[in-house]
Image: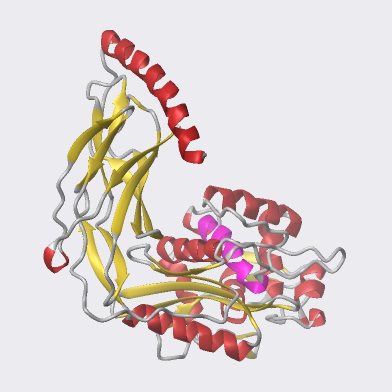
């Protein structure tokens, strides 16, 4: 059963949060009302337009959605799918299963499909040679090398198909809802024309995870060039050396679907992560990404709604020594809002209910969904601020009876809403 606790917006001065909670018993749920909003500026904020068919842009620190356009539509990411290949390698390195000094063989398959004969992006690794993992990673991250991607996949899983299965399994763990990987490169399969698909939202979620989880490995993206085996290759990301702060990730192109890019940029302590797809040319791809990143850096105010560990609200607990538990974020909960706009902030705690005892302190319980009018700005994980032990038998019996009544009433309410 999905339960919600709503927080409605009032005003707070000078961008600070004044939070007060009022408990309301409405038929079957406890609803907690919080107060927070903004002092609007007099000027109207510019609304950005993009020529991209699909776009998703977020502020990394707050998770605030800056732009969303057809963000959940599956597209063919081409080489941008290599972010998932890297995630699996980075995870194995971080867990001690692989080291940067491990050597991987270059099979004939890797050489033919991704090496010199393929006429695709390659680091020109010789067939039947062995290459250090660090060199393969640099070839993959700096020059989008397909031979490096295939060699890694074969070395880790035995075959590219087996590695793709691992990619799909890991994608589910990371919550990538539309991702379907068929290989480690993102290239379409010549035999049947099949191709990897994923949404631009999934690309941003994955990129953000990689940046935050593996910063020491992510840094290879920002190297402007890579010389290996006597061959000097420039970074294929045209924005790496630009002034807007881009420090990594991939471009992609697939005939018939257009040009795309997933990129991250950092400036003055703020990081923007963005993915676009469906542009008509490589130059248009670059100009659109530059425009969106620059707009994200200059056009928003950051607002702190709750400090780390500050209670956001309470949700009911069935069968416990306490009838409810307070929820809070692990980090300060902040959002970006467009400069110069009147904001209608609302927030809702969404959790799987009923929440049953025992509840452990630090247990993830739900998500705080923050909206500006009807637009989702951010979704922040919420955790229990204290433990709630299992209560005595008589308390559990009363809660069980109440839960039965709640379930009957809840079904009726859902029907009314859906109709």
Residues 288 and 136: in front is: 288
Residues 230 and 218: in front is: 218
Q: Is residue 288 left or right of residue 11?
A: right
Residue 116 visible in this rendered orientation of the protein? yes
Q: Is residue 195 left or right of residue 170?
A: right
Q: Position of residue 392 (x, y in %)?
A: 26, 12
Which of the 4 quarters of the picture holds residue 284? Answer: bottom right
Residues 346 and 158: in front is: 346
Image height check: is 149 above or below 398?
below
User: Residue drawn 32% across and 82% down?
Assistant: 298
Which of the 4 quarters of the picture holds residue 24? Answer: top left
Segment colored magenta: 78-92
Q: Main secondary structure of the magenta part?
A: helix
Instruction: Work out which quarter of the rendered image holds the N terminus and state it.
Output: top left
User: Residue drawn 69% across and 56% down?
Assistant: 164
Image height check: is 244 above or below 166?
below
Q: Position of residue 391 (x, y in %)?
A: 26, 16
| Residue lying farthest to the right in this orientation | 191
Residue 226 visible in this rendered orientation of the protein? no
Residues 88 and 377: in front is: 377
Q: Position of residue 320 (x, y in %)?
A: 28, 21
């Amino acid at each position: 059963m999905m339960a919600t606790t709503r927080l409605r917006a009032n005003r707070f001065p000078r961008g600070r949060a004044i939070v007060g909670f009022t408990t309301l018993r409405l038929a079957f749920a406890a609803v907690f009302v919080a107060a927070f909003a903004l002092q609007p500026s007099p000027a109207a904020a510019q609304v950005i337009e993009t020529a991209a068919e699909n776009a998703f842009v977020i502020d990394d620190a707050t998770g605030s959605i800056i732009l969303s356009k057809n963000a959940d539509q599956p597209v063919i990411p081409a080489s941008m799918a290599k972010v998932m290949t890297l995630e699996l390698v980075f995870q194995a390195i971080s867990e001690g299963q692989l080291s940067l000094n491990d050597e991987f063989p270059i099979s004939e398959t890797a050489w033919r499909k991704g090496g010199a004969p393929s006429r695709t992006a390659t680091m020109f690794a010789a067939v039947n040679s062995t290459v250090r993992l660090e060199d393969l990673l640099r070839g993959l991250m700096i020059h989008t090398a397909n031979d490096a991607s295939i060699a890694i996949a074969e070395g880790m899983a035995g075959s590219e198909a087996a590695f793709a299965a691992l990619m799909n399994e890991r994608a589910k763990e990371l919550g990538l809802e539309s991702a379907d990987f068929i290989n480690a490169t993102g290239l379409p399969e010549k035999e049947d024309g099949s191709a990897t698909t994923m949404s631009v939202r999934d690309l941003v979620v994955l990129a953000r995870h990689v940046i935050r989880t593996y910063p020491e490995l992510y840094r290879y993206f920002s190297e402007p060039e890579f010389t290996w085996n006597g061959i000097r290759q420039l970074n294929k990301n045209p924005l790496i050396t630009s002034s807007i702060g881009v420090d990594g990730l991939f471009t992609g192109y697939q005939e018939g679907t257009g040009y795309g890019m997933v990129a991250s940029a950092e400036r003055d302590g703020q990081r923007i992560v963005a993915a676009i797809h469906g542009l008509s040319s490589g130059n248009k791809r670059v100009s659109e990404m530059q425009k969106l990143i620059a707009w994200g850096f200059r056009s928003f105010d950051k607002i702190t709604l709750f400090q780390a560990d500050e209670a956001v609200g309470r949700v009911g607990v069935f069968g416990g020594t306490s009838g409810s538990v307070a929820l809070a974020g692990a980090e300060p909960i902040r959002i970006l809002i467009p400069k110069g706009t009147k904001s209608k902030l609302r927030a809702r705690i969404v959790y799987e209910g009923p929440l049953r005892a025992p509840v452990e302190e630090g247990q993830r319980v739900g998500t705080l969904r923050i909206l500006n009018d009807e637009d989702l700005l951010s979704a922040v994980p919420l955790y229990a601020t204290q433990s709630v032990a299992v209560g005595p038998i008589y308390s559990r019996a009363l809660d069980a009876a109440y839960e039965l009544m709640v379930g009957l009433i809840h079904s009726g309410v859902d029907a009314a809403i859906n109709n």
